[in-house]
Amino acid sequence: MGTIAMWVLPRCAVLLSQQCSSKLPLTHVESGCLRIPCGEGACPRLSAQRSPDSAAATQPNGGKPPRHGAHTPQISAAGTVAALLQRLPQNLAAKQLATIDQLTNGRVAVNIVSGWFKGEFQAIGEHWLEHDERYRRSEEFIRSLKGIWSQDNFNFRGDFYRFDNYSLKPKPLGQPEIFQGGSSRAARDMAARVSDWYFTNGNTPEGIKAQVDDIRSKATANNHSVKVGVNAFVIARDTEEEARAVLAQIIDQADPQAVNAFGDAAKQAGRASPEGEGNWAKSTFEDLVQYNDGFKTNLIGTPQQIAERIVALKAVGVDLVLAGFLHFQEEVEYFGKRVLPLVRELEAKALNQQTAAVA
């Protein structure tokens, strides 16, 4: 029974209005959404490094992996390859990731995003594939990426990617782990066949358990193993009242136009799937303020409450929590000092109870 991993987002995604409190360190507007930055340099190494299974997940223009790698010997870096980038020569993507893996001493992972927003494709003249076809392309991308990294004279003949006796040198030091998200049947089936990690939006333990059980049963049938991560927005305070007040303030300061526009686009995309729903089908306005449903995971309250909820997530099969914070630098440090030790204590207690029961 291992410990649950905690990853932190260098850039916290919250849709806020421009009339926010001056205490909120807003930086710039991107696609109508105001972002809260983490700050630079010392952020990822503040307290995430207190745990050997921590990591910093990077986004485009957020963070500097080589510099972070130089200063954080225990932290991994995960980059994203979006569907729009999959049209580039795949050998170039494989080479870039292999180079970064070499520079960071084997600590790179990659998140494959199949794409859901049609406007992004139209903006650059990229062909818009139907929902399940986008996942079929991503699966070919993953299979060929793994092949390039692990084989010489690699051959692959798919509908989207083809290789004939292709060799990449130098290869990554290891086999970088592949992450993906998505809630549709096509997304879950892809995870059960080829991905190392499946990310899901925030949800209750019961909702997450249903996804975990479904994916792992199919993965077992495919002789494959997959780990599960869940998104969460953490608001840890000395009292629950303080934490709930911060949540209320975030929602109160949300930009209704930005939140509703995102919600409409996301739900329209979900209706394009064969199931007729997507990640955000049941998300309320309040949920969409943190646009990966991070509030739903309910890591909001005192350190003890949050630690207990993290362990409850682990009990239903979650291997990793991808955590976002409001004031990144201060709150990651608070989390590392006040919450993580309680998580480890609760994990140790549960392990001792299991050992005693077996004996």
Image: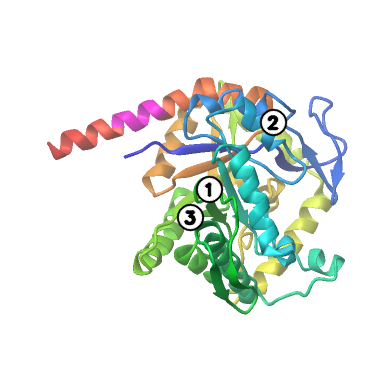
Residue at 76% of width from left, 39% of height from top? 252
- Name the residue that disc number 3 marks: 196
Residue 67's disc is 2
Q: Is residue 126 above or below residue 201?
A: below
In the rendered structure, does residue 345 fall within the stretch colored magenta?
Answer: yes
Q: Secondary structure at mark 2?
A: helix
Looking at the image, is mark 3 or mark 1 earlier in the sequence? 3
Q: Secondary structure at mark 1?
A: strand
From the viewer's perspective, is the residue at label 2 or at label 1 nearer? 2
- Tell me the crowding category of disc 1: few under 14, some 14 to 19, or many 20 or more residues within 10 angstroms, Cα based: many
Residue at 76% of width from left, 57% of height from top? 262
**Visible residue check, residue 115:** no
- Name the residue that disc number 1 marks: 230
| Residue 216 picture location, percent across and down | 39, 60
Residues at marks 2 and 3, CA–CA distance in whole angstroms: 26 Å
| Residue 207 picture location, percent across and down | 47, 55
- Quadrant location, the C terminus: top left
Q: Label 1 is placed on what type of residue? A: Val
